[in-house]
């Protein structure tokens, strides 16, 4: 789904947001997803035109059932990365080719991407999306997500220091250890324990 508030072709503010049923529908405070979506919508309202592309890639692509299983392990002390790995699931298996198709369809030539995730920028650029600038999308930590946010910063290279940056500044950030997108999106997962995401 994409939400579009008028359009122009250059330097369009863009939020590429992946579904988080637990925070966006159930109101969970364990992550920052719902707050980020809210921030992005508010930013775009104030800096029209802009686009929010909302993708059904719950749990960084592992699906809701697997994410709930990962949450059960997090209750036992594993962090968000190790919980996925303990289930034999990838750290992140999201796929963004639809974003490049939507932007091409809309005639958008370049974007300012609202994200703290340098990997998301690199993946989109590899798909041909011209990311001219990164707009930080930082939600203040709360008691229930402070550890989760620290894990995103320390283990997933998210830029959560609060400063804006150009895309080039982000290039020398540490690569995430472990798997990323390690199943090909044309067919079945290579993982026997994988439950197909609900799309
Ligand atoms: N597997 C897993 N997924 C989670 C967890 N908490 C939130 N998510 C999912 O994480 C996704 C959002 O990814 P994030 O890592 O928060 O952020 P990002 O999209 O990579 O980066 P930003 O653009 O900065 O938001 C959504 O699909 C959520 O459903 C968790 O503990 N485990």
Image: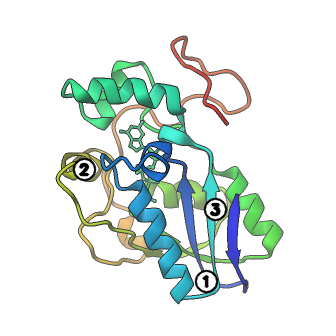
- As helix, strand or loop, the secondary structure at mark 2 comes to loop
Q: Is residue 149 above or below residue 135?
A: above
Q: Which residue is situated farthest in the top direction here? A: 192
Q: Is residue 84 visible?
A: no
Q: Which residue is mark 1?
A: 11
Q: Which residue is mark 2?
A: 145
Q: Is mark 2 within 8 Å of ligand 1?
A: no
Quarter the N terminus occupies: bottom right
Horizontal placement of 46 versus 128: left or right? Answer: left
Q: Residue 76 lies in what quarter of the image?
A: top left
Q: Is residue 169 above or below residue 68?
A: below
For this rendering, which residue is in front, 103 or 27? 27
Q: Position of residue 194 (x, y in %)?
A: 54, 19
Q: CA distance from mark 3 to mark 2?
A: 24 Å
Residue at left 35%, top 56%? 32
Q: Which residue is mark 3?
A: 53
Q: Residues within 10 Å of mark 3 (few under 14, many from 20)?
A: some
């Amino acid at each position: 789904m994409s939400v579009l508030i008028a359009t122009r072709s250059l330097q369009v503010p863009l939020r590429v947001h992946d579904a988080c049923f637990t925070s966006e529908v159930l109101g969970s405070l364990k992550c920052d997803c719902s707050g980020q979506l809210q921030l992005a919508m508010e930013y775009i309202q104030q800096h029209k035109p802009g686009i929010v592309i909302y993708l059904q890639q719950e749990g960084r692509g592992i699906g809701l059932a697997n994410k709930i299983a990962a949450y059960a392990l997090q209750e036992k002390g594993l962090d968000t990365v190790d919980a996925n790995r303990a289930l034999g699931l990838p750290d992140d298996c999201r796929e963004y080719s639809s974003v490049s198709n939507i932007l091409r369809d809309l005639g958008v030539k370049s974007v300012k991407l609202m994200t703290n995730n340098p990997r998301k920028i690199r993946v989109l650029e590899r798909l041909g999306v011209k990311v001219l600038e990164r707009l930080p999308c930082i939600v203040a930590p709360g008691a229930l997500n402070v550890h989760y946010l620290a894990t995103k910063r320390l283990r997933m290279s998210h830029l959560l220091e609060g400063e804006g940056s150009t895309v080039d500044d982000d290039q020398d950030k540490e690569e995430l250890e472990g798997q990323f997108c390690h199943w090909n999106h044309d067919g079945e997962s290579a993982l026997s324990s994988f439950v197909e995401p609900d799309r």
